[in-house]
């Protein structure tokens, strides 16, 4: 739905992230563990935005007589079963239930009520969903894209993440979005009407030609709408093929020539200094309004931090299904190939037992297998760097003791003398001193993180 990258950042956070205790020390050995979270990638969009790098299938794939939606949902349901079988074999059936489920995309709000209920039923039966678990669904604000929010709530959704991106009509048109600012307001009102417990707005800065005043206008309008959570991402228009593998087993799709040309033109209207200024402005404005920047790109009202995304940053194990989805079991990172045809073929949708979606064009009786993809076994050095980098993204930072061991030991002096890291006391626990990024450290976090790997 939105760009996800390390953004520019500015202000030192005032309150550390509560919740989970620190994970194992950076040098501790990794151990496999059952997932606490589940991600489902539903890759369909009505139209593809020219800046989007996600695994997305748009146009005739998403609606009309040649749509592949039914087949994909049936395949995802099958994959849920196969992955659960594997977890049963590894950890037994009495695994802890999931603390969070996340339907991402793409535009998951295009899913029908029947399929969402079916997928949730499979998740409850095979993975378990803890009482009070967070169940997020990403939605686009347009009236033909946001779906029936009351249906989503009945299926179990507790949190809505709206791909607003901007509240300036001209900017929305410039970046190829289909909705208007009024649609964002209507979608948020509908979410409140449906009693969705928590609503996030995704917003983009460093939009081509976006002035600081225009950015301020979007932030003002967003706060007027009173969401519970804001994700602010810089629009990145890097070489998309450098971001991931686009071959048959790769987790990304190639960029079309038209999108490449659009990005080249748009890049000329971006500005690093202005983007830093926009980020600093947002940080100060939201802090002044009582929001907490609990992660480099994320702000929440108290109690509305994204529990699902916190699982990623706390490096907890998560399962994932759908084309291009990534999973982590505590030791191995695994991904599904982005190729939809290969995904559907592997899962042999249309075989007996599929009660929703007849899956035209598949071979009845074929045995489904897990889809193609790849995996990476992390070395102890990479695992240690990951622990530190992910923890430093949060306002809680890391225990100061972590700076005694590699790889932080090697860069701590440089980072402190350069003003990128600072020690602080956790006001909530008053325990041992901790280290976190300073304002400057957040602005230069990519440079620091590069030195840690
Ligand atoms: S709506 Fe979101 S996921 Fe779909 S193409 Fe646009 S940015 Fe990508």
Image (cartoon, grey):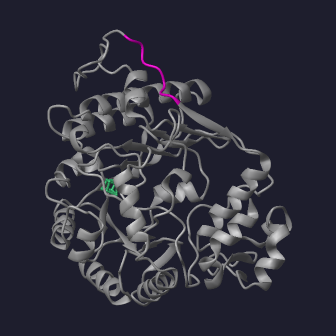
Q: Which SS type dominates the magenta stretch?
A: loop
Q: Is residue 405 toward the left or the right of residue 82 in the image?
A: right
Residue 62: image quadrant is: top left
Q: Position of residue 325 (x, y in %)?
A: 47, 42
Q: Which residue is drawn at 38% across and 51% down?
A: 257
Q: Quadrant of the N terminus?
A: bottom left
Near-viewer residue (391 or 50): 50
Residue 31: image quadrant is: top right
Q: Is residue 9 toward the left or the right of residue 152 in the image?
A: right
Q: Where is residue 78 in the image (x, y as percent from the top left)?
A: 38, 26
Q: Residue at x 47, y 61 (%)?
A: 4
Taking 25 as reference, is 403 above or below it?
below
Magenta residues, start to end: 366-372
Near-viewer residue (47 or 133): 47
Q: Which residue is drawn at 23% across and 46% down?
A: 110
Q: Where is residue 361 in the image (x, y as percent from the top left)?
A: 26, 18
Near-viewer residue (162 or 287): 162
Q: Residue at x 70, y 71 (%)?
A: 448
> Quadrant location of ligand 1?
bottom left
Q: Is residue 288 toward the left or the right of residue 438 in the image?
A: left
Q: Where is residue 294 in the image (x, y as percent from the top left)?
A: 52, 73
Q: Quadrant of the C terminus?
A: bottom right
């Amino acid at each position: 739905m939105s760009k996800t990258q390390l953004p520019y950042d500015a202000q030192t956070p005032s309150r550390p992230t509560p919740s989970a205790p620190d994970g194992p020390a950076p040098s501790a050995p990794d151990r496999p563990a059952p997932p606490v979270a589940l991600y489902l990638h539903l890759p369909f969009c009505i139209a593809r935005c020219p800046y989007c790098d996600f695994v997305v299938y748009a146009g005739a794939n998403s609606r009309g007589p040649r749509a592949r939606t039914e087949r994909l949902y049936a395949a995802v349901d099958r994959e849920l079963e196969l992955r659960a079988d594997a977890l049963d074999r590894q950890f037994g059936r009495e695994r802890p239930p999931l603390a969070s489920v996340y339907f991402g995309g793409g535009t998951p709000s295009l899913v029908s009520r029947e399929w969402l209920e079916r997928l949730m039923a499979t998740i409850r039966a095979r993975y378990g969903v803890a009482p009070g678990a967070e169940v997020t669904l990403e939605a686009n604000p347009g009236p033909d894209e946001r779906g029936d929010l009351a249906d989503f709530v009945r299926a179990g959704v507790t949190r809505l993440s709206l791909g607003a991106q901007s509240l300036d009509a001209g900017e929305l048109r410039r970046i190829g979005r289909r909705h208007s600012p009024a649609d964002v307001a209507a979608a948020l009102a509908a979410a409140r009407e449906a009693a969705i417990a928590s609503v996030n707005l995704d917003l983009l800065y460093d939009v081509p030609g976006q002035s600081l005043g225009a950015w301020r206008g979007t932030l003002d309008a967003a706060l007027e709408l009173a969401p519970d959570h804001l994700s602010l991402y810089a629009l990145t228009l890097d070489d998309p093929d450098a971001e991931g593998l686009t071959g048959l087993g790769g987790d990304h799709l190639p960029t079309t020539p038209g999108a490449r040309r659009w990005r080249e033109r748009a890049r000329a209207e971006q500005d690093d200094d202005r983007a830093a200024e926009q980020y600093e402005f947002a940080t100060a404005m939201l802090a002044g309004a009582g929001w907490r920047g609990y992660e480099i790109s994320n702000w929440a009202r108290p109690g509305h931090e994204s529990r699902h995304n916190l699982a990623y940053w706390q490096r907890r194990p998560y399962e994932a299904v759908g084309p291009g989805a990534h999973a982590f079991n505590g030791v191995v990172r695994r991904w599904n190939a982005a190729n939809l045809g290969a995904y559907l073929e592997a899962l042999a949708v249309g075989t007996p037992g599929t009660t929703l979606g007849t899956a035209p064009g598949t071979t009845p009786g074929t045995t489904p297998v897990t889809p193609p993809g790849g995996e990476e076994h992390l070395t102890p050095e990479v695992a240690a760097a990951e622990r530190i980098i992910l923890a430093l993204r949060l306002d809680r930072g890391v225990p100061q003791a972590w700076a005694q061991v590699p790889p932080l030991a090697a860069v701590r002096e440089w980072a402190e003398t350069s003003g990128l890291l600072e020690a602080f006391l956790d006001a909530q626990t008053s325990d041992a001193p901790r280290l976190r990024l300073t304002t400057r450290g957040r602005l230069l976090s990519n440079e620091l993180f590069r030195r840690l790997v």
